[in-house]
Structures are given as C-alpha cells and as structure tokens.
C-alpha cells in the first residue's frame, strides 16, 4: 500500500502485416501505457496512422458537433449497442443533414427574435412622448431630433443659437423630441439642432420607419414575435424528437469512432521500418503474462513480446532498471527483414519513467483525492495515501468532536458518494464519511451533540466506558483539559513527524546506504526526539511551562491522573546530547540546512493548532447555544436554560444568570431562537470544513509530506477504452 504497483516496460515487435491484429489485441486488454518513439534509432522512423484515420477523425468531429447541437449528454443513452462502419456510412449523412437543417432554421428564427426584441426596446422611449412616429420626421421647413437628455439644458442651448428662429420640445420622461425652425439661411436638418446642443449631454435616438403610434408599432412587433416564437417552438420540438431518436446512436457512434481513432493513430507512437514495427510501453509487472498470452493466441503471425525493463523503487526521482529475460529483441523475423535496435542489447525507444498505479485498499482509496490535490506520488517514492487515511479523519474528528455534526458530515458524504458520477466528488464523499465517523466517535467521548450534553450521564458511561470520558475544557471546572489538549497535540505532532522522518530514512537507506541515511534523515530523527526529550524533562524546569508537568500528573491541576511529572534530568541530558549529535550530523551531511536545526521544535508546536481549533469550534457552538437557550453558573460549570419557567425558578433562587436566552422570551423568542439555532449550527458545520479540514490538510501537506514526499508522478493511461455505450457482444444489445 505504501508503494505503487510494480511496473515493467515491455516491447512488442512484429511484422507490419500483423500490426492491425496486434493493435486490436493490445487495445482490447486496456493494459499497455504506450511510450512514444523518440527517433533515436538508426534505420527506424516514426510510424504513420493506419488507413482511413482521417475519415474516422472527420466522422468523430461530425458526431460530436451533432451531439453538441442537440445537447446530448451521457444520461441520454439507452442500452448498449453494436455499431459498425456500414451503419455509420448508411445513417450518419442523412442524420447530419436533418439536424443541420433544423439547426439552421433554429438559428435563423432566433436571429429574427433577437432583431424584433431589439426593435421593441428601441421604440419604447418613443411611447413616452405620446406622438405618432410619422410626426417625428418628413418636414421641409422643420428640423427634428429625438433623443434623451435634460430638457432645461437643451432649451438653454437652443435659446442661444442664432441659426434657429423658434423651437418646441415635447417631453416624455427622459426622452425629448425637438422641433426647430431654422433661420432663413439654414437648412432644416437634424444636424442644425445637434450642432446647437453640442455642449449638452444628449443621446440621439433613431426614429423607427413607421406611420403608427408607438403603442401600435410595438403591438405589431409583438405579434410578429409570437409568430416567430411559435415557429421556433415547432423547430425545437422537432429537434427534441430527433434527440430522443438518435441520442443512443450518436453516443454509441462517438464511442465507436473514438476507439477506432485510438487504434488507427496508435502507430504514431511506434518505431517502424519498411516491413516491421516496434511498440513499447509500461504495464503492471503482475500482468505481463496476460499480455504475452493474449498476443500469442490472437495474432497469427510473427510477433515477439519481451519484458525489457523492471522498474525498482528508488527515492532519487529516477528508477533503477534491471534487465529482465528476453531483453535482446534486436532480431525478430519479419516479412523479409530484421528489426535492429541501437546495439545496446535492450530495445528502448524512449527514456520515459514508469507511470504510477496507486495500489490502495477500497477504504483508503477515497483519500487519493487529497494526495492528488497535492501531487501524484512519483513511482520512486512512498505513496502516503494509507497514512493520510489513518491520520486525517482522526485529527478532524478530534477537532470537531460532536455526534450531531459527525452524523451530518456522514450524510453529506453519503450523498456525494452515491448521487454523483464524478470520481472527485465521490472521493470527497468517502473522505467526508470517514471524517464524520470519527467526529461522531469523538463526540461520544466528549459527550456532545451540537454542543449540548443531552443525557444525565456522559455517553461513555452508558457504554460501560466511563474511563474514556473526555472534556473539551471550555467549562471552568474542566479548564485543565484545554491545556491537556495542547500537550496532546504536541505529542501527536512528534509521532506524526517521526513517521515522516522514518519514511525518509528508509528511502535514503535504499538509495544511498546507511551512512548517508544517518546524515540526511537520521540527524532529523535525533534532533526531533532529542529536543522534545529535553523539553519534557526536569532539566531547567523553571524555564518551561508548568502545564507540561501538571496536566497528566496527580492533583487538582491534572486533567487525567497519569502520574507524569516530566522525564528525569538524565533523560533531559541524553535528549540534549542527541539533539547536538543530530545537528552535527546534519552539518556534515547537509551544511546548508544548519539554520533549520530548530525545525523539529517548531514543526511539533505547529500541531497545537489541533487544540486551538478544538477550543474555537467548541466555543462557537457554545456561543450559539448560549444565545438561544441562555445559561447560569453553578458548581464550577455552565448550565443551559431551556424554558421560561426554568428561568423564573432560577431567578427566584438567586442563581447566577449568565444570559437569559431567546427561548425563555415567549413565542417570539422561540421562533427567533429556532432560526438562530439553525443558522448558527449551520455556520459551525461549515467552519468545521474551513477550519478543521484545512488545518488537518495543512499538517499533512506541510509538516508531514515535507519530510519525505515530493510528488510529480505520471498517471497510468493504458491504451484502450472502457466501453459504456457500445458492446462487441451481439447478445447484449
């Protein structure tokens, strides 16, 4: 699980007369991640697409265009069906002509609709004037200009214009119709008015060419629009009919043509001679025999399969390659020729690293979405998916720790996992269900349901696990628990960081040997454990926070009486010495990293964000409940008030009321309180993702991954296709 599947590079060499059969067989296995020929072999050239590849791609483009025109989606498909070249040749041209004709009609009608709407919008300002459209033009002795602007400013500008004898302005809202009589030596044109008001903010409107009133003109346009809309509806209904009739065929045709295009373009990755070809690619090592057996049984002719490389796991970003049996494929009988490699003894057409197939269990698999969001693991490094699966839900659940929120997270995750087809959403659903499960589990231990303690006794007591009852530390009576959680967070950080450094140490041993591993990773292990052994020891105890030695000791300041009062001074001295030895080793191995020697201390302290989010989320939920229900203080604890009668009784008894609460204020208070309760806890639920979720992810990415993980692996993309709309089984259609 911590390593991807072992990969092997294989070579398939054969005569060109069997290239079609080889491609068909390899494609049906959906197994071989093809390598592209880099052109480095003397006597070889890159392959060419098979016959009719251009026609296939042209048909594929046509089918996809028709699907886009009809708005066809995968959900529109019916039963799987068999599609062949003859059926496509017979049906596709007529279907394309019919769909394109209807689409052209639709486009033309939509254009008409758009033009009519634009005309209606353009004539609306004229309706405010109360003048027929034919009155707004056609005069010999009057200049007319219609537009939008300020009437007073226009009138002032026209009064000052000597070229105009008289004018009249008809107004309707912001629309102004200006009629002006020019002086004797000027023509009656709209430019006369425009020149006169050039200093006024004015937008000119074009007068529609019509004799009716604006209202009648709009009515006529709306009648035209209704006619065009009816025609458009008929065309769209016919397109829907065509969609229902042809969706299954087009989706199947697209899949068939996609598969055919893959097969016909596969030789572009091959190295070829006049009579032979060589194809290479990566497959899971465990499935090599399956590939060899399939080619032996399905291909009737000269073809040779060899495992030429078996990639080993190394951590330097490269892969160690060992030659495996059959690597000498330099000579393969063909139709009158030989396949000759570059003389190296191993036919390797491209220096490409192995792709990554993450071999995680079904439970851990959803957490690959968190790994891929950072970066896919390289083949040469550990895959941290299973470690994130073991740590992320625990950290998330620890920070939220509430049965109510946990159940809601699980429900949200279940919906994402079961109701969506997108693999990313399904994976997030799986993560949410695991995180919600641990949130509910910690909620039982904390005895919390939406921030409340609903039962007379803590929930662990009912389960016979009273010794596991935990407290978040908000209540004054349990204040020492808050400090305890900060201590626990640091210990979690030390353990988590140790895991990262140990993985790095193992990789360094595999790559460079024990000596370099001690310098490069062992030094950090010594410094991490040494500095914290020193911090938790009695050495210089007066200079250290008291809670480190009290929260798990005995007495009133202890959250849990474990008797831990710090390590002895001897342990502190050993820890300090280990830290110094680690620093010296780091300086010898990686001198440039000496300024970072305090990272083991700082990185572990970074995990205190777990306790901080725990208290912040608990405090937010408490605040919501306090506003809604109110609370009083008694016996060193806060207690919520749920009814008005309870409040009255407490006031009569002289109880210390912190806040009366909305629900104690009658019917109105109950309604407002219910709204505040729903909205408030919805906000807390969302904050669980944005605070607890992001903080847990940050600890994984920054603190943990930074010790051993880089990422940057290549996805395994086998040559093949997972059919969903087509089948080769004549009995299944």
Image (cartoon, rainbow, N blue to C red):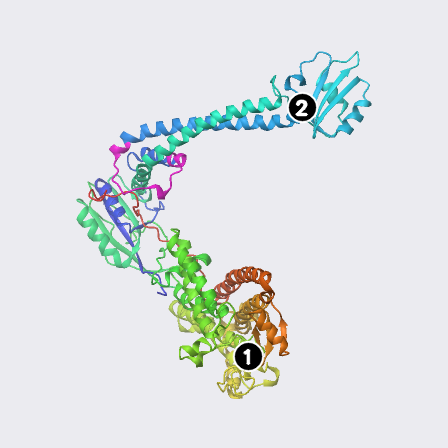
Secondary structure of residue under mark 2: loop
Q: Could you say where residue 559 lies in the image, as x and y percent from the top left?
A: 52, 81
Q: Is residue 71 magenta?
A: yes
Q: Can residue 179 be seen by looking at this rendering?
A: yes
Q: Residue at x 29, y 30 (%)?
A: 91
Q: Could you say where residue 583 lies in the image, as x and y percent from the top left?
A: 52, 75
Q: Is residue 510 magenta?
A: no
Q: Quadrant of residue 192?
A: top right
Q: What residue range appears in magenta? A: 65-88
Q: Could you say where residue 549 lies in the image, as x and y percent from the top left?
A: 55, 84
Sort mark 2 into few (<14), some (14-19) or many (20+) by Cα contacts within 10 Å: few
Looking at the image, is 45 positioned above or below residue 476? above
- Left-right relation of 99 to 555: left
Looking at the image, is 524 positioned above or below residue 307? below
Sort mark 1 into few (<14), some (14-19) or many (20+) by Cα contacts within 10 Å: some
Q: CA distance from mark 2 to mark 1?
A: 80 Å
Which mark lies nearer to you, 2 or 1?
Answer: 2
Q: Quadrant of residue 66?
A: top left
Secondary structure of residue under mark 1: helix
- Left-right relation of 715 to 692: left
Q: Quadrant of residue 49?
A: top left
- Left-right relation of 36 to 81: right
> Which part of the image, by quadrant, shows the N terminus?
bottom left
Where does label 2 land, which residue?
130
Q: Nearer the viewer, residue 621 or 53?
A: 621
Looking at the image, is 469 positioned above or below residue 596? below
Query: First in sequence: mark 2 or mark 1?
Result: 2
Where does label 1 land, which residue?
478
- Left-right relation of 123 to 552: right
Q: Nearer the viewer, residue 394 or 166?
A: 166
């Amino acid at each position: 699980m911590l390593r991807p599947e072992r990969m092997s590079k294989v070579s398939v060499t054969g005569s060109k007369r069997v290239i079609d059969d080889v491609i068909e067989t390899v494609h049906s296995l959906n197994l071989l991640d093809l390598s592209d020929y880099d052109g480095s072999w003397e006597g070889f050239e890159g392959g060419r697409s098979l016959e009719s590849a251009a026609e296939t791609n042209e048909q594929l483009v046509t089918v996809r265009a028709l699907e886009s025109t009809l708005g066809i989606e995968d959900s529109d498909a019916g039963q799987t069906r068999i599609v062949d070249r003859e059926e496509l040749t017979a049906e596709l041209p007529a279907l394309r002509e019919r769909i394109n004709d209807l689409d052209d009609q639709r486009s033309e009608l939509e254009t008409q609709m758009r033009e009519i709407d634009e005309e209606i919008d353009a004539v609306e300002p004229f309706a405010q004037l109360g003048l027929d459209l034919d009155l707004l033009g056609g005069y010999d002795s009057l200049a007319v200009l219609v537009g939008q602007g300020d009437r007073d400013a226009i009138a002032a500008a026209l009064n000052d214009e000597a070229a105009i004898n008289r004018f009249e302005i008809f107004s309707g809202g912001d629309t102004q119709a200006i009629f002006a009589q020019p002086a004797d030596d000027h023509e009656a044109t709209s430019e006369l008015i425009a020149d006169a008001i050039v200093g006024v903010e004015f937008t000119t409107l074009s007068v529609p060419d019509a004799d009716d009133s604006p209202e009648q003109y709009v009515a006529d346009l709306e009648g035209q629009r209704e006619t065009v809309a009816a025609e458009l509806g008929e065309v769209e209904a016919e397109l829907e009919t065509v969609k229902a009739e042809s969706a299954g065929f087009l989706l199947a045709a697209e899949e068939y043509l996609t598969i055919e295009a893959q097969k016909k373009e596969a030789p572009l990755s091959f190295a070829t001679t006049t009579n032979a070809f060589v194809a290479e690619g990566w497959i899971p090592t465990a499935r090599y025999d399956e590939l060899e057996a399939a080619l032996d049984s399905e291909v009737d002719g000269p073809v040779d399969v060899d495992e030429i490389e078996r990639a080993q796991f190394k951590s330097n970003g490269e892969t160690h390659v060992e030659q495996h049996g059959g690597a000498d494929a330099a000579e393969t009988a063909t139709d009158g020729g030989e396949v000759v490699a570059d003389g190296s003894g191993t036919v390797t057409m491209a220096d490409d690293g192995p792709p990554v197939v993450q071999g995680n269990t079904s439970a851990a698999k959803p957490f690959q979405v968190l790994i891929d969001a950072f970066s896919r693991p390289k083949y040469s490094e550990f895959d941290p998916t299973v470690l994130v699966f073991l740590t992320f839900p625990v950290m998330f659940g620890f920070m939220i720790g509430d049965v109510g929120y946990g159940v809601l997270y699980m429900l949200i995750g279940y919906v994402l996992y079961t109701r969506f087809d997108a693999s990313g959403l399904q994976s997030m659903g799986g993560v949410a269900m695991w995180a919600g499960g641990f949130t509910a589990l910690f909620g039982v231990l904390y005895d919390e349901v939406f921030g409340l303690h609903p039962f007379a006794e803590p929930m662990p007591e009912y389960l016979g696990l009273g010794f596991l009852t935990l407290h978040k530390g908000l209540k004054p009576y349990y204040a020492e628990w808050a400090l305890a959680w900060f201590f626990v967070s640091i210990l979690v950080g030390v353990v988590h960081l140790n895991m990262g450094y140990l993985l790095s140490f193992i990789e360094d041993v595999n790559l460079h040997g024990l000596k370099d591993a001690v310098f490069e990773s062992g030094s950090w292990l010594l410094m991490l454990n040494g500095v914290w052994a020193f911090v938790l020891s009695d050495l210089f105890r007066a200079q250290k926070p008291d809670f480190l030695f009290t929260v798990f000791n005995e007495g009133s300041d202890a959250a849990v009486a474990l008797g831990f009062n710090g390590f002895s001074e001897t342990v502190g001295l050993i820890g300090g010495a280990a830290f110094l030895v680690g620093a010296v080793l780091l300086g010898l191995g990686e001198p440039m990293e000496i300024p970072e020697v305090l990272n083991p201390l700082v990185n572990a302290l970074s995990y205190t964000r777990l306790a901080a989010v725990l208290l912040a989320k608990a405090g937010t939920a408490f605040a919501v409940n306090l506003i809604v229900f109110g609370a009083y203080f008694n016996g060193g604890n806060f207690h919520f008030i749920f009814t008005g009668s309870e409040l009255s009784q407490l006031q009569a008894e002289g109880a210390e009321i912190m806040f009366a609460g909305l629900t104690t204020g009658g019917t109105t208070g109950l309604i407002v309180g219910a709204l505040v309760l729903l909205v408030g806890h919805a906000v807390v639920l969302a904050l669980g993702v944005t605070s607890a979720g992001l903080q847990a992810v940050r600890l994984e990415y920054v603190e943990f991954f930074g010790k051993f993980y880089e990422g940057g692996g290549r996805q395994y993309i086998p040559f093949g296709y997972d059919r969903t709309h087509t089948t080769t089984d004549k009995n299944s259609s």
